[in-house]
Amino acid sequence: MLWTPVRSNVANSIKKLLPRELPPSLVGKRGNLYEVLSRWPNGGVGKFVHQTRWSTKQIEGSYWLVTRSKFKCEGKHGKAWGLLYWKTSVDKLVSPKEQRIGGSLKYIWDEGPSVTKKA
């Protein structure tokens, strides 16, 4: 077990080099829309995202397909555009025209389509 103290010393050294609060791109949890999208290459273009409140409201299969995005402040703010698919069992596009995604800072977002949460 000669390697155990060496491993812990290396881990401690790496922790000292990292900032106390990691940037959004290194944290893998829910957040505002820009924090979720900034974790992906190309700003999350082509990814499905949904507001977590849709799941609690029993809105299943709804999501935004992100078509473009611009970030500010290390991925915490910005603008995003996409196509809204609402309550889909088969792809049901709300509008064929690209729209700016609303509620991006106000609500908590997650990846993928919304899934109904069972109580």
Image: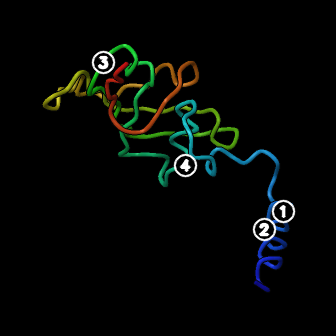
Look at mark 4 in the image and give the residue it sits on.
39
Q: Earlier in the sequence, mark 2 or mark 3?
A: 2
Mark 4–mark 3 distance (CA, rounded to whole Å) = 25 Å
- Residue 61: % across, % down: 26, 28
Q: Is residue 52 above or below residue 22?
A: above
Residue type at mark 4 is: Arg
Q: Earlier in the sequence, mark 3 or mark 1?
A: 1
Look at mark 2 in the image and give the residue it sits on.
11
Residue mark closest to the camera, 1 vs 4: 1
Q: Is residue 117 above or below residue 71?
A: above
Tell me the SS state at disc 2.
helix
Look at mark 1 in the image and give the residue it sits on.
17
Residue type at mark 3 is: Ile
- Residue 109: % across, % down: 49, 30
Tell me the SS state at disc 1.
helix
Task: Answer with left or right where residue 66 lies relative to residue 2.
Answer: left
Residue at x 50%, y 42% (from the top left corner): 37
Residue type at mark 1 is: Leu
**Camera-side residue of 74 and 14:** 14
- Outermost residue to the left: 90
Task: Answer with left or right where residue 58 lies relative to residue 23.
Answer: left
